[in-house]
Image: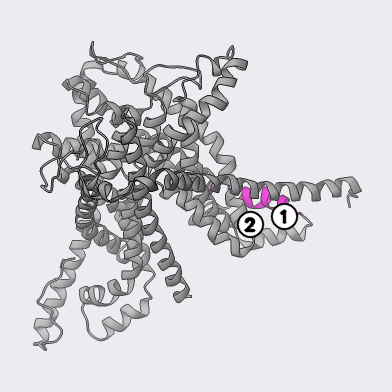
């Protein structure tokens, strides 16, 4: 046996306390930016979120006043479009991975979906520009929606897979045992059982694309006026924040803060609701 | 979702007919699922094809010289990728150096140190860091962090250490340094979340064995838990690196956007992602546009490789294929 000296023992204990405290300090340092940024957003943005900001169009450059009503509507419009485009494909792919997911092809798809989740959104923006903007000869809300949909598809795929997989097999067996076809079982038993989880995943995907500016810069471009047509440029909150922050006008900076506050409120609501509902679901499963 | 109406269960039908319906609806269902799944793979191929197609002009004009040339002169139509590769490399690696210790510390705190009631809230706040949109980081960075940095960090640094190349030149505020700081904050949640998962996946028996030998908690974490989880943690770090390489809006807003190769952290720089974001809509000539898309192609390839590598590492660990 090695006899350890008393000072050595003492040092080990001190080091233990020091190192464990240091991890706590790390956690505090990491959490700090969240609160700092939120405080700045609220203090700088709250004064400017008023009726004019929410309901009127942007004024010409340099003129104070005006609002971002078109960008607010544009953001929801394109995110909604992305949802419509990506939901069926993402859920379908997720169901495939969960139900037929042992083949080599399924492993490849899972892998590609994960790789796509890490793909920079600006790359997706450039690709969609080449696909839609160049042939249509115009920036458009459609291109913006498609770019956002491409970001959402792999995210929805992976969460749907997890949620469908989590549905107990007994449910499937009961349904099949009653004579239902496999498709009927999926449609009427498994998917409804997984619905809550899928909705959660979709909400997180929506929260992510709602704040995306990079894929919209040269697909939807932005617009100073109202537009609800698919084939015309459309404004959105994230791109508008970028434009206003770059501009030299004091009043546009003020509006950029207000838009950022609005953006973060939507994103936070989606995140918090999604997480609270997942937690309850997992508690129910236990 | 696709579903045939032939298999209506409320109307009893002849048995043989039902069988046929079963056959067809199931086949159709499966085919639809496969088709949806294939879209995911097609997406990657489509991105690669579109990027390749649009950058063909630039590839034909400059060839391999594009990668090593440091010219970026839209007026004379001479383009080279080196300043952006340099800027991307410097900012992402430096951000990683800052982010990794903080992320690992936080992951250890959440998984091993914190009392149980504290784990969920801390994880949640860290995940919020990932939920904040990039453009919001950029806005905060350019109006709050950059002025502060210039006043309190860069001016003193350049006065005292200006002779060192790392801190040479006047203090601009918008700089590589600003981009590095914003990037490190932005990748911390990704590295933390994956590391935490990997650390939690370390079997409890490993820890108990270590405690049984008389190790302290820290010794157990350092020598047993981190050692056991190291491949997964490496995966987490590479995953975070991929994020840092592709991060666009926040970097564009604080890096200063100047296509020069500089060793000074106080000087403005440029990255692959930020030059695309900043110049794409202004690019007028076909060659200019094509050069920008070639930068996009490069970014695509780099992040593809990084993410594939990270995924393979993380998967290996979570499947338990790596036994150490």
Q: Is residue B226 magenta?
A: yes
Q: What segment carries the magenta color?
A: B216-232
- Compared to residue B52, the image places residue A41 above or below, namely below
Q: Quadrant of residue A272?
A: bottom left
Q: Which residue is mark 2?
A: B112
Q: Is residue A35 magenta?
A: no
Task: Determine the secondary structure under disc 1.
Answer: helix
Numbered mark located on residue B217 in the image:
1
Q: Say if mark 1 contacts mark 2, CB within 8 Å.
A: yes
Picture coordinates of residue B155 (x, y %)?
Answer: 55, 20
In space, the residues marked 1 and 2 are separated at their CA atoms by 9 Å
Nearer to the camera, B145 or B282: B145
Subunit of label 1: B
Q: Quadrant of residue B44?
A: top left
Picture coordinates of residue B73 (x, y %)?
Answer: 28, 14
Picture coordinates of residue A216 (x, y %)?
Answer: 24, 40
Q: Is residue B248 visible?
A: no
Q: Is residue B139 left or right of residue B25?
A: right
Residue drawn at 23 percent across, 52 percent down: A76
Q: Is residue A197 visible?
A: yes
Residue drawn at 15 percent across, 46 percent down: A142
Subunit of label 2: B
């Amino acid at each position: 046996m090695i006899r350890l000296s008393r000072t050595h023992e003492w040092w080990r204990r001190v080091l233990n306390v020091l190192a464990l405290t240091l991890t706590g300090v790390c956690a505090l340092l990491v959490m700090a930016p969240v609160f700092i940024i939120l405080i700045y957003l609220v203090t700088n943005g709250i004064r400017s979120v008023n009726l004019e900001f929410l309901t009127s169009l942007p004024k010409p450059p340099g003129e104070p006043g005006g609002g971002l009503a078109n960008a607010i509507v544009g953001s929801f419009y394109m995110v909604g479009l992305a949802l419509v485009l990506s939901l069926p494909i993402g859920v379908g792919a997720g169901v495939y991975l969960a139900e037929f997911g042992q083949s080599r092809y399924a492993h490849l798809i899972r892998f590609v979906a994960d790789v796509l989740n890490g793909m920079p959104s600006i790359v997706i923006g450039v690709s969609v520009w080449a696909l839609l903007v160049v042939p249509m000869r115009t920036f458009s809300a459609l291109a913006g929606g498609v770019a956002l949909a491409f970001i959402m598809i792999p995210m929805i795929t992976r969460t749907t897979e997890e949620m469908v997989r989590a549905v107990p097999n007994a449910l499937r067996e009961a349904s099949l045992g009653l004579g239902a076809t496999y498709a009927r079982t999926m449609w009427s038993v498994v998917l409804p059982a997984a619905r809550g989880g899928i909705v959660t995943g979709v909400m997180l995907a929506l929260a992510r694309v709602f704040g995306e500016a990079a894929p919209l810069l040269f697909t939807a471009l932005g617009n100073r006026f109202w537009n609800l047509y698919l084939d015309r440029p459309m404004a959105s909150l994230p791109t508008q924040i970028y434009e206003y922050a770059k501009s030299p006008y004091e009043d546009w900076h003020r509006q950029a803060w207000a838009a950022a506050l609005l953006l973060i409120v939507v994103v936070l609501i989606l995140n918090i609701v999604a997480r609270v509902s997942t937690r309850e679901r997992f508690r129910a499963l236990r | 979702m696709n579903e045939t109406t032939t298999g209506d269960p409320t109307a009893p039908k002849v048995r043989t007919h039902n069988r046929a319906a079963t056959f067809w609806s199931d086949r159709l269902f499966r085919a639809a699922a496969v088709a949806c799944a294939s879209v995911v793979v097609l997406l990657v191929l489509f991105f690669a094809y579109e990027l390749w197609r649009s950058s063909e002009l630039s590839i034909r004009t400059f060839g391999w010289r594009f990668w090593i040339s440091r010219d970026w002169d839209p007026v004379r139509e001479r383009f080279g990728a080196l300043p952006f590769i340099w800027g991307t490399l410097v900012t992402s690696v430096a951000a990683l150096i800052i982010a990794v210790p903080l992320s690992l510390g936080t992951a250890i705190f959440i998984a091993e140190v914190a009392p149980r009631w504290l784990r969920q809230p801390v994880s949640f706040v860290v995940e919020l860091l990932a939920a904040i949109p990039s453009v919001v980081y950029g806005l905060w960075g350019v109006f709050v962090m950059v002025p502060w940095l210039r006043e309190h960090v860069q001016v003193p640094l350049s006065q005292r250490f200006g002779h060192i190349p790392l801190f040479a030149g006047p203090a601009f505020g918008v700089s590589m340094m600003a981009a590095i700081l914003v990037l490190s904050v932005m990748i911390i949640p990704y590295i933390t979340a994956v590391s935490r998962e990997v650390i939690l996946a370390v079997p409890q028996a490993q820890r108990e064995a270590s405690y049984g030998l008389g190790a302290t908690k820290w010794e157990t974490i350092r020598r047993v838990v981190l050692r056991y989880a190291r491949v997964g943690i490496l995966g987490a770090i590479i995953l975070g690196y991929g994020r840092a390489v592709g991060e666009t809006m926040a970097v564009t807003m604080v890096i200063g956007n100047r296509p020069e190769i500089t060793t000074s952290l106080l000087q403005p720089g440029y990255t692959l992602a930020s030059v695309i974001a900043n110049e794409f809509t202004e690019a007028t000539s076909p060659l200019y546009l094509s050069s920008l898309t070639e930068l996009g192609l490069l970014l695509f390839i780099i992040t593809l490789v990084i993410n594939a590598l990270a995924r393979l590492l993380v998967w290996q660990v979570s499947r338990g294929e790596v036994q150490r």
